[in-house]
Amino acid sequence: VPALLKWQGEKLVHEAVGQNLAMADVRFNPLLFKLEVGDLALADEQGQSMLGFQRLLLDFELWRSVLDQTWTFAKVSLDTPKVRLEIRQNGRHNFSAMLDKRGGADAKSQNAAPWPRLAVQQLAVTNAQIDVSDLLLAEPLITRIAPLTVAVDGLSTVSAQVAQFRLTAPTALGESLSSEGSLTLRPLAIKGQLALKEFQVNTLTRALSRLV
């Protein structure tokens, strides 16, 4: 099963968006219904990294899913994910080609059925890194957000189900954003607190300069 998942995953991604996906390790425990994917990387047409992660764990609860008629996961964890966003001088970014190829499929799915019944008891994203390069500015803006962490308890698409979340996002310049509170997916609503610390006005004004 792991070898088939690895081969099919890489093949389907290349056919769907034309990008090269690589997965170093795929493991599946058929008794516990746990899937682990290690060292996944997606590269753009120039071979440069777009996104990836060190480890993904999906802990599926089969019997709870059957009883509740809801796809239920005890835990979904994503360790050390990395995203590189580059806004180029022609106004496009390194995800543009992939999104262009998905445009037709997305248009067909606009009137698709609503989200399936899904529940994730514990969602965790740890040690994430986001690199942003805006080359459209007269003075290019290059920044790194790391280590970003996200924790959500009780996430569900079931109507009115309330989840609790926590988020921290420091930057390489010593700035930090943190937030915590509650959220629902149906309807989409977020309530909580947002805190900015040591945030440099220059960073914000440069990032928003093309919008004003």
Image (cartoon, grey):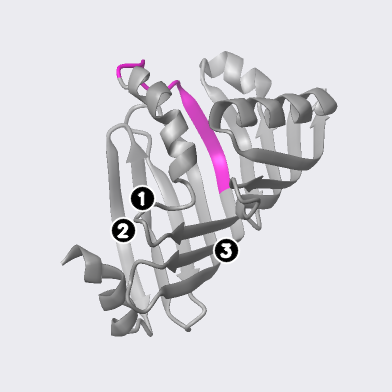
What x and y, as percent, mark residue 201?
28, 83
| Residue 157 covered by magenta stretch | no
Q: Residue furthest left?
A: 212
Q: Which quadrant of the figure has residue 17? A: top right
Question: If the image is split into quadrants, where does the N terminus sit?
Answer: top right
Circle 3 sits on which residue? Answer: 129
Q: Residue furthest front?
A: 90
Earlier along the polypeptide chain: callout 3 or callout 1?
Answer: 3
Disc 3 secondary structure class: strand
Circle 1 sits on which residue? Answer: 182
Instruction: Specify start and end residues of the magenta stretch as a single range.
Output: 111-123
What x and y, as percent, mark residue 136?
35, 66
The residues bearing labels 1 and 2 have C-alpha atoms spaced at a distance of 6 Å
Circle 2 sits on which residue? Answer: 192
Disc 2 secondary structure class: strand
What x and y, as percent, mark residue 13?
62, 31
Residue occupying image coordinates x 46% and y 73%: 142
Q: Amino acid at mark 2?
A: Gly
Question: Is disc 1 in contact with disc 2, using a CB cutoff of under 8 Å?
Answer: yes
- Locate residue 168 relative to residue 202 in the image: left or right: right
Above or below 144: residue 20: above
Earlier along the polypeptide chain: callout 1 or callout 2?
Answer: 1
Residue occupying image coordinates x 66% and y 26%: 61
Q: Amino acid at mark 1?
A: Ser
Q: Nearer the viewer, mark 3 or mark 2?
A: 3
Nearest the viewer among 206 and 144 is 206
Instruction: For residue 158, say whether it is visible.
Output: yes
Disc 1 secondary structure class: strand
